[in-house]
Image (cartoon, rainbow, N blue to C red):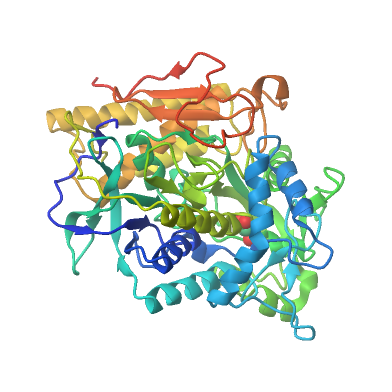
Amino acid sequence: MTGIRLNAPAPGWAIEADVVVVGSGVAGLTAALRCAAAGLSTVVVTKARLDDGSTRWAQGGIAAALGEGDTPEQHLDDTLVAGAGLCDEEAVRTLVTEGPDAVRRLIATGALFDTDPDSGEIELTREGGHHRRRIAHAGGDATGAEISRALVEAVRDAGLRTIENALVLDLLMDADGRTAGITLHVMGEGQHDGVGAVHAPTVVLATGGMGQVFSATTNPAVSTGDGVALALRAGAEVSDLEFVQFHPTVLFLGTDSEGQQPLVSEAVRGEGAHLVDASGTRFMLGQHELAELAPRDIVAKGIMRRMQEQGADHMYLDARHFGAEMWEQRFPTILAACRAHGIDPVTDPVPVAPAAHYASGGVRTDLHGRTTVPGLYACGEVACTGVHGANRLASNSLLEGLVFAERIAEDIAGAPREAGRPVLPETPSPLPLIAPEARAEIQRIMSHGAGVLRSAESLAAASAALETVHLNAVRATREGSGKTAEPGVESWETANLLCVARVLTAAALRREETRGCHWREDRPQRDDASWRHHLVVTLTPERRLVVRQTEGTAFPPTSRSTVPETIPPTVLDAPREP
Ligand code: SIN
């Protein structure tokens, strides 16, 4: 227990449950449904509406060895290659072997995937890094929306208790340092209002990603790293945060464009679209045997290199040869998004550039989704199960959410716990509030210094700039001057963004090599001799971020509470009083 908390009022109301699931994407709702089916009293807490998380935006689909001739072993091979030497093989094996049945259970829950009109079999497409057609999709390019619809409907049918429009604040713990629930803030009118608590011996974090830490991202506005920041404050280990995946083909809307940007799914390339420069040259040919369908990091780097060589701010995705009918039937969502921005993919190449898309790292878990804090679980993008390594294989994330959510529910149901009484830390240590105005500044610092291309110099500058944001906030709070922040959703979110930005930058600075989606201009080679291990970060009660290094790539199969140190820990400058 670190005693570190967000600066928030004490809870004014409380409810009881066996399990509280925070987040309502594929991972959260699957975990909640399975816990409820096992007879556990379950509450789902979500930041916006039940169907507003990242899952809804997933286009391409869900990868699983469902096709004739495909095997979990081949899916494993592709996942390990994409992960660039850092996947935990046992975790990947769990994913690919349990994946196909998990997808079948999702279908049984009500999700409707696209099928071949003649055979009735599920239609499968290809995406980057997959050597065969393995991606099931729904509504053409609206897979996440369909999965979300089916799961939300199932949650409503099952009569689960849900609290919408609620930002999770902190983990509650009992006197033995075990999970005892959460504090949360409900926005607006309803059954509950303001800061409250859900008392529960088990908490499942399924809060999604942290894409909003960058200026341009495919992630929705709710993806502010709340789960990772909460877990750090609770003393949990966080791993692999330096591996941020930048999706290669995001609709380019101008260099100043900020916030959530429309995704142009890899499935468009999977169906035969070409990446070209302004002169129409296919620049990925010859760079990788899979050309435009190389793993995502390689395509993102290919695009960035070409942009640098040509002084351009974007490249193009050319799929005019699909024709209007295919665009309308197979990619209706992307077609509509492009047309809404004045681009018609039927007649024009689509301008694209990489943007932040997926956090391959997160809260460190074992194969049952347990974090290093007893009673705290994590699944989906917020978690680091070891499946993704240094770069997630396309469309593995929905599958990871499904498979590990089911494992979590099984683990919880197998060993139900009594609720401990929440105790407040003896020395509560609230973090300074960060004024919402700092959000755009944090995003600019991160995009500039810790984006697709990084170097020791850019990361050190980003780190120093983030420290200044923090110190200004402390000074403003102490002196009541400048942009003093009031407790509230925006300032809590901004504090979370600053926290994850600092950790991400620290880990990226520390990893002195290029691997997967971590691209260091000053260290362009992958260095297996020195760097084939994970960086694990914890926050100490003294508010120090400690970065440690694991022995090899495997996550220990059972307790993660002790990480062998192969190098002396790096103690970063803690958030301190100026
Ligand atoms: C896409 O459709 O390109 C995104 C799929 C993913 O991120 O896995």
Outermost residue, bottom side: 118
Report ligand 1 position as a quadrant: bottom right
Left or right of 354: which side holds 125?
right
| Residue at the spot 63% in from the left edge and 55% down from the top edge | 396
Residue 44 location, quadrant:
bottom left
| Residue at the spot 50% in from the left edge and 75% down from the top edge | 150
Residue 265, position in %: x, y? 65, 61
Residue 358 vs 498, above or below: the answer is below
Left or right of 269: which side holds 367?
left
Residue 569, position in %: x, y? 47, 17
Residue 334 location, quadrant:
bottom right
Left or right of 503: which side holds 181?
left
Picture quarter with the C terminus: top left
Question: Of residues 533 and 287, which is closer to you in this image?
Answer: 533
Picture quarter with the N terminus: top left
Q: Is residue 431 visible?
A: no
Outermost residue, top side: 568
Residue 506, position in %: x, y? 48, 27
Q: How many marks?
A: 0
Question: Of residues 542 and 452, which is closer to you in this image?
Answer: 542
Question: Of residues 438 and 174, which is closer to you in this image?
Answer: 174
Residue 202, position in %: x, y? 34, 50
Q: Is residue 484 visible?
A: yes
| Residue at the spot 42% in from the left edge and 23% down from the top edge | 546
Question: Of residues 312 and 223, which is closer to you in this image?
Answer: 223
Outermost residue, front side: 415
| Residue at the spot 46% in from the left edge and 64% down from the top edge | 34
